[in-house]
Image: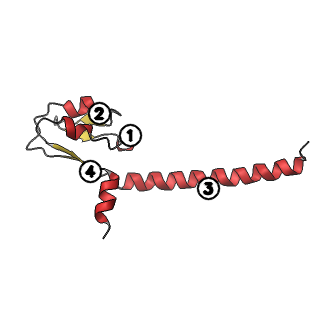
């Protein structure tokens, strides 16, 4: 049988680990959201507002704006799959995944 003092110590250690994990997750999420502004680029002169990119987006993070052009409505859901770029018949949308942006910034 395990002593109750030992269980209390273990629970206290687990609470510290859980708190650290939550802090790390929130930090990583904030870093990810900070870099999302330039993730999806739509070249409006080329875009014919067909919405193929919006319809084929697996996590449904793209949406159509009031002007008819697609935009990244839910950046936290974007998984950098590139389907919007692949499916666009006019090459009017580009996906710049986070790993590619980070790699290009390194010397």
* Earlier sequence position, callout 3 versus callout 1: 3
Residue positioned 30% across, 52% down in the render: 37
What number is the disc on residue 96?
Answer: 4
Q: Distance between the Cα atoms at labels 4 and 3?
A: 31 Å
Q: Distance between the Cα atoms at labels 3 and 1?
A: 24 Å
Residue positioned 91% across, 42% down in the render: 1
The answer to whether residue 85 is left or right of residue 89 is: right
* Earlier sequence position, callout 2 versus callout 4: 2
Say which residue label 2 marks. Answer: 57
Of 1 and 15, nearer the camera is 1
Asked if the residue at tag 2 contacts the one at tag 1, i.e. Cβ–Cβ closer than 8 Å, the answer is no
Q: Position of residue 44 (x, y in %)?
A: 12, 44
Q: Position of residue 71 (x, y in %)?
A: 24, 41
* Earlier sequence position, callout 3 versus callout 2: 3
Seen as rendered, the residue at the extreme bottom is: 107
Say which residue label 1 marks. Answer: 77
Label total for image: 4
Say which residue label 3 marks. Answer: 20
Q: From the viewer's perspective, is residue 95 above or below residue 103?
A: above
Asked if the residue at tag 1 contacts the one at tag 4, i.e. Cβ–Cβ closer than 8 Å, the answer is no
Q: Distance between the Cα atoms at labels 3 and 2?
A: 34 Å
Q: Position of residue 59 (x, y in %)?
A: 35, 34
Residue 105 falls in which quadrant of the image?
bottom left
Asked if the residue at tag 3 contacts the one at tag 4, i.e. Cβ–Cβ closer than 8 Å, the answer is no
């Amino acid at each position: 049988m395990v002593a109750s003092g030992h269980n209390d110590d273990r629970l206290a250690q687990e609470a510290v680990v859980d708190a650290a994990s939550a802090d790390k997750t929130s930090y990583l999420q904030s870093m990810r959201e900070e870099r999302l502004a330039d993730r999806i680029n739509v070249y409006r002169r080329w875009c014919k507002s067909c919405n193929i990119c919006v319809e084929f987006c697996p996590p449904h993070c793209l949406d159509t704006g009031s002007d008819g052009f697609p935009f990244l409505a839910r950046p936290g859901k974007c998984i950098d799959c590139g389907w919007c770029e692949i499916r666009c018949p006019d090459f009017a949308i580009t996906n710049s995944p986070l790993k590619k942006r980070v790699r290009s910034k390194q010397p």
